[in-house]
Image: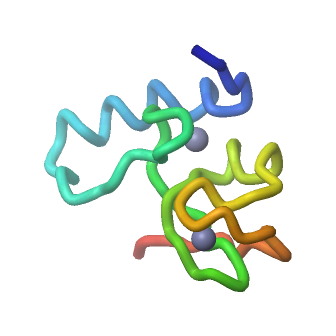
Amino acid sequence: MIHYYSCYFFLADNLLKENLELKEQRPCKICMACETNVVFLPCGYFVSCAGCAPALQLCPICRATIKGTVRTYVA
Ligand SMILES: [Zn+2]
Ligand SMILES: [Zn+2]
C-alpha cells in the first residue's frame, strides 16, 4: 500500500460527509480516501483527488501523459 499523506487532511472530513448523505461522491481511485475532484488533461478522466494528482505522470486509466489537471468543485 502506498500512502499519500496529503490526503489525510481530507480524510476526516470525507468520512463525515459519507455519514451524511453524499453517497454519490466517488472516492479517488488512487488513495480511496478523498473524493474525486480533479480531471486529467487531455484525456478527461475523473479518477483522482487533488492530493494524489501531482504525484501522477500517467493517467491510471488510459496511460496517457497528464499534461494538466483541472480542479472541480461540487456546489
Ligand atoms: Zn487521492
Ligand atoms: Zn486518461
Can you tell which quarter of the image residue 69 is in? bottom right
Does residue 6 appear left or right of residue 33 in this picture?
right
* Picture coordinates of residue 50, whole percent (x, y): 67, 53
Q: How is the image coloured?
A: rainbow
Residue drawn at (72%, 23%), measured in percent from left and top? 5
Q: Above or below — where is 59 with respect to 43?
A: above
Write the residue at 48% across / 47% down. Answer: 28
Horizontal and vertical percent position of residue 30? 55, 40
Q: In the image, what residue occupies the spot 50% across and 59% down? A: 47
Q: Which quarter of the picture shows residue 57?
A: bottom right
Residue 33 position, x and y percent, is 46, 32
Quarter of the displayed picture in which ligand 2 can be seen: bottom right
Residue found at the very far bottom of the displayed protein: 42
In this rendering, is residue 37 above or below 29?
below
23 sits to left or right of 1: left
Task: Pick whichever, 62 or 9, lies toward us.
Answer: 62
- Total marks in image: 0
Give the quadrant of the N terminus.
top right
